[in-house]
Amino acid sequence: MPRSNNKVADDGTSARPLQEGRALVDSLIKVVACYRHLASCVGGCTDSSSMRRDLQQTRERAQTLALSCRNHLTARLRDKTLPDDERKETERLWVAFSSCLELLHTDMCKVFTLVKCFSPACNSTMVQTGIQGGTTEVAAQALSLPDLQETNNEAQTSSMEGQEQSQLEQEIAQVDRTLEDMELKVNVLRWTVEAQGPQYADPVSTDSTSLALLSINEEAAKRFCDHRQMFVAMIFCAVAIFAVLLSVCVVLLA
Amino acid sequence: MTIRNARDHGQRYRPRMACLKKVETVVLEMQDPKSGVKSQTQRLVITTIPHAITGEDIVAWLANRFKIDALEARAMGTMMVAFGYIYPLQDHKRLILKPDTSLYRFQTPYFWPAQQWPVEDTDYAIYLAKRNIRKKGMLELYEQEQYNNLYKWLNHKWDFIVMQAKEQYRAGKERKKPDRVVFDCQERAYWVVHRPPPGTVSAMDYGHERMVDPNVVEKKTSEYYRRIIMFTQQCIMRPRVKSSVSIGALVKCSTTYKEHDPFLHPCLPSNPWLTDDITYWNLNMPNVEIPTKMRVERWTFSFGELLSDPRGRADFRLFLKKEFSGENLAFWEGCEDLKWGAAETMKEKAQQIYKTFLARGAPRWINIDGKTMEITVKGLAHPHRYVLDAAQTHIYMLMKKDSYGRYLKSPVFKETQRRAIAPEAHRFSDAQLEQNGKRRRPSLSPIILRQQEEEQKAKLAASGPVDITQLCRFTAPVPHLAVYTGICEAQSTASPGLMTLPNSAACPSPISVAIDSTPASERRFDGNGGPSSSHFPSIAEASVSEEENQPPVPKSRMALSLSKLLRRGCNAPSVFASLSPKCGVTSGGGKVQPLGVEPLAQPQSRRIANFFQIKVDIPPECRIYPIDSEDEEDDGPDTARGVKEIICPWETVTKQDGAG
């Protein structure tokens, strides 16, 4: 989703900042989703320094986005002259933003604890989770950049790790503070916000291969039976045709 | 509002989860490429995924590592699967370890169960929405229900949830296919552990949350040391029992109760927690007509067991009623009521109990020794919850040593034993068990149960009479205090306008009327300055005049006097003893006032066989029987002295002598 960060000349309509707010929140949601995918790999067999770097970069991106989002939304909500329906919309965005930030906060805390236990230096203690590929594509999507290059500095020294950890700690504290400030500055009553979207998200049925893979184990036996039946039927038909041919030949020859 | 980790007030530490750290170290040990569990590849149709392990390998590794046998290793492996550190690849809903070639995989550390973070509903909603995105209608029934509920509760962030689900789905698509499959499996396994399908046992049930993190090592501050010192001092001060004694008690307890423990012995017909069939609870309701054999057997274990079971208590009450010694149980129940009841009615209850059971001339006088009586009466000057404790213990011991033994040999108990039922054990098939699970219904609301209890108590109080050792018209039962379950036969109401007492005799008593009409709280203060002699003539006259107005009086008077005579029959020796010169000495002494001298004009009528079992255990010079006004009237001049209400001794400020 493109991020429209550039302010076009104000043409007097108030749709612009609303769209901008929505776009900001959307991109934050996207980055947080990618962060979660990356975080799920920490401690697994694909955990490496490059992955940690991706994680860090995604996180930093999320932080900057969160900051701009917060400023934007706070400014909008404190604006007393906002018309009602726009206020509702902004409040909805606000709730989405705060939930997103809470999700990010939880993920960051989890990563913080995991990183303490699992260091990419010693690979033997990593949990063999079955993941094979890297997470570069996910990180790339998060950062909206084409394929990241495998930069040098493969081996992260422990001092860098320590630095990273303290930085993470600081950032967690920062998000904490952000959340608190948000609650103090703008009072959005949660019970007044109503969902506008559908209860069920639209099913994206284009890609069903993973589904097939997942259900393969449960249906393997069933499919096998079906195959067998089909196979038997085919053989039967073949035999029948053969018999017909033979009889025709016999008749012809006779 | 969400709980943020730093600002969390620490109320969320889950006690039984302290083992998680240990399981984590074991899991990490299993990863070792040399000495860990050997892994295989899982072959799917399109691709292969590495790092799959078989159940038997896990069991073998655990048995080898911890030097335990295969069964225990299997149990330990099941525990690891139940916690979510390893998840099954086939049959993902059953979190057990199968020691065969079925495949498992390690869960990624992100999805490990954690002490600090509770599992958020938001995440669950996102997960369900993602599954729905992948294929509509893929949610199971219970997941569907939960999804709808979450839609209601988390409605304000629902847009966010849907959007986040979409974005996570899209981000997942960026990954390679096998990785996507693995991630989906991981997430699915995580949610099977933390939101288990209904009817399954979850390892995540952990009870109350604690304020202190059990995994954190406490810093040794002075506060900490002060606590440790206090704790050890209390340990030293604790009374000790010889281990032979305590072990003997333990052995005795376990042999007695081992068949009654539903954990150790299957309960009949079936354990409702296991089979979802509530026959067992229905058969063991508190006031069921016919108890089960196991229940009746429990009553024979100890007196406390009998009393704590409401059905047992009712049976015992019936037995005591037949023996005419129900006042002990009634007193005990009254004391229990006092101890556990509301604070506002406590004083009244204490009053009532005293008047009904303890005072001289009380209608349901109980037999406790002089010392206990002294202590009790002294305490009743400033009543509190436990003021009747000594007396209650005494009576409890009395019942236990005396009545309980007789009860167990009595026909009442034998009849109950005979009629007790022993239900057959259920044998449910799997399909039936599922059916039962679906038919589960919530039990009766506790409000309704409480109402039923109150109705029961009221019924019991209204039905009666239970047993009256002495007739007394001077204490009126106050219906709004459920002090005792029987009533005094001789209570009466003069006029319909006043409080009607159940089963009241027709004979009026102005004093009791006066008592009735004043609320209990006032009764303490007025009319209790002691019936000074100036009152008596008026009262006597009033009673005389009242008597004449009531036509059915003579008959009941006759009946009453006859029963009184019968009761007094046993007191013949004490009557004669009272003639001894000792009698005069004690009058006016002691805290409880004697009620006057019994009329000596009818010694011969007292030689009647001891019809009722009266427990008389007081020194003969103190009179226990109330002097009823009828007898007084017969005796004429003695009337003035005889008419006396039962006063609570802590209320009299002035001591009275002789005729008071």
Image (cartoon, grey):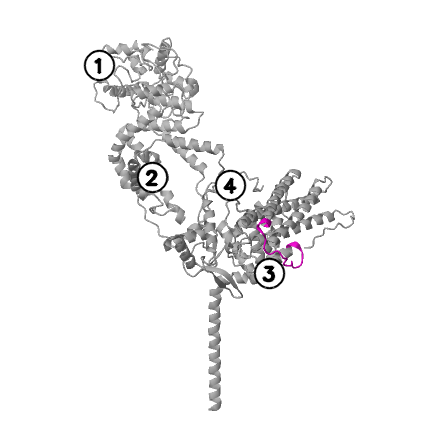
- Alpha-carbon distance for marks 3 and 1? 107 Å
Q: Is residue B342 visible?
A: yes
CB-based contact (under 8 Å), mark 3 and mark 4: no
Could you say where residue B450 lies in the image, as x and y percent from the top left? 43, 35
- Alpha-carbon distance for marks 2 and 4? 46 Å
Q: Quarter of the image holding residue B329?
A: top left
The quarter of the picture where the N terminus of chain B appears is top right
- Give the mark toward the camera: 3 or 2: 3
**Mark 4 or mark 1: which comes first in sequence?**
4
What residue is shown with label 2? Answer: B289
The circle on residue B576 is: 1
What residue is shown with label 3? Answer: A205
Magenta segment: A142-160
Of residues B281 and A49, the one drawn nearer to the viewer in this rendering: A49
- Give the mark toward the camera: 4 or 1: 4
Disc 3 is placed on an element classified as loop
Query: Taking A30 as reference, is B614 left or right?
Result: left
Residue type highlighted by circle 4: Arg
